[in-house]
Image (tube, grey):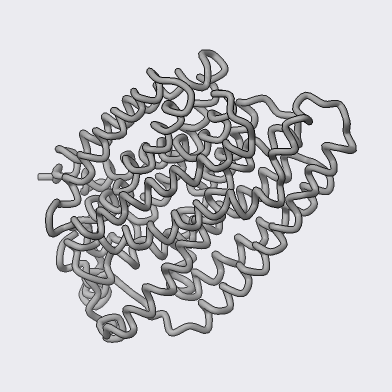
Amino acid sequence: MAESTITSNNSAVKDSGNTTRSIIIIGVLFFIFGFVTWLNALLIPYLKIACELTTFQSYFVTFAFYIAYVVMAPISTRTLNHFGFKKGMSVALGVMAVGAFLFIPAAMNRTYLIFLLGLFVMGGGLAILQTAVNPYVTIVGPAESAAKRISIMGICNKLAGAAAPIIIGFFLQLDKAEELVGTTNESALDEMALRVIPPYIGIIVVLLLLALWVYKSSLPEVEAEDEVEGNAVQKTTKKVSDYPHAILGVVTLFIYVGVEVISVDTIIDYGIFQGFDFETAKGFTTGTMVAMIVGYLIGIVAIPKYIKQENALKVCAILGVLFTLGAIFTSDFLSVAFIALLGLANSLMWPAIWPLALADVGKLTKAVSSLLVMGIAGGAIIPLAYGGLAEILDKQDAYLVAIPLYLFILYYAVAGHKIRKT
């Protein structure tokens, strides 16, 4: 990202104390939306049993959650322009709380469509939140170390992802639900559906408290420097389409989120396919998150001192291909371990893609950020492709869908991010 995109109109951001406080607040937000996002890995097998779904139908959990990014991303930009970053984050947290509330009537009636509506609303709130926090972290410091800052945020996100299946799994008791597969015992299924209510009441309370905390906080507003200059002088005549590297960045992010969601949200179901029970399989998600955290720690130490962020993206894409092939051509625990290791392969992709896509876009930072957030909808489409392929082939060979996707990410790391309109 060009030096000109770093904020200069807000002296509060330049103060190291305020910057540290801002990063702490953003870190907490990354933890929260990591916790909410990676609950999907548990909800897929949980709702598959409770709502009596097929494998393909169960992956509409990810579809409903991530398709909200397509619908809400344009609205996100207008929301942030109207409320500003800080108030916009509070609004986003409130929207997420509404989505979590919908889980209560969904569980009481065991209605899959209401569960999906709740997931959609929560995804919409996250779309607003991510539109704010990702460019915020990117432009709050030097461009060359943006991937390092996002890596720190990623650790907060993935720590939440590692904790989510353990904490919520305690309430859902999936290990005791295996005997209900294919059952016609409606009362038992009703009882199982109600287990989701207590943890989601807790989530609602936390989201509302966070919304109030952010609203009352000293979190400063941040604008791209070119954006400020443009407001003072003249509006840009440039369009997002004038930045092909940014458009390719959106496609790359779409693909990356898709393969990451596959690696995280399928691993419990895949572990069961490989013969493990629910109690054992639910821990595999934590393994994926630990692998991601290791990758983020490597990024914090190595970027940009030892490796450029585009080179880190190349390495990660190559590892993605190798680990996917390892999962397909091995079996049992080793095959599941390769899926967990995709967490390592995916870890530095998000931190690298954002700054590469935002490079040189200047006053269009918010517009490109909105498109990048729309790219998160890859988590809606690509896992459905995996689910459909799993029913045609099986849950192991279906991972073949990831190979060409990782190869496209490699292309962006090698050449795509360098393309400029002449």
Q: Position of residue 150 (x, y in %)?
A: 32, 60
The image shows residue 41, relative to residue 184, as above or below, that is: below
Q: Residue at x 56, y 40 (%)?
A: 62
The quadrant where residue 7 appears: bottom left
Q: Position of residue 394 (x, y in %)?
A: 52, 17
Q: Is residue 375 left or right of residue 416?
A: right
Toward the viewer: 70 or 315?
315
Q: Position of residue 185 (x, y in %)?
A: 88, 30
Quarter placement of the N terminus: bottom left
Q: Residue at x 14, y 51 (%)?
A: 307
Toward the viewer: 139 or 386?
386
Q: Is residue 370 left or right of residue 303?
A: right
The quadrant where residue 178 appears: top right
Q: Residue at x 54, y 43 (%)?
A: 283
Report the number of discs.
0
The image shows residue 170, relative to residue 58, as above or below, that is: below
Q: Position of residue 161 (x, y in %)?
A: 50, 52
The quadrant where residue 109 appears: top right
Q: Is residue 110 left or right of residue 62?
A: right
Q: Residue at x 45, y 18 (%)?
A: 397
Residue that extends furthest to the left in the rendered view of this protein: 422
Quarter placement of the C terminus: top left
Residue that extends furthest to the top in the rendered view of this protein: 393
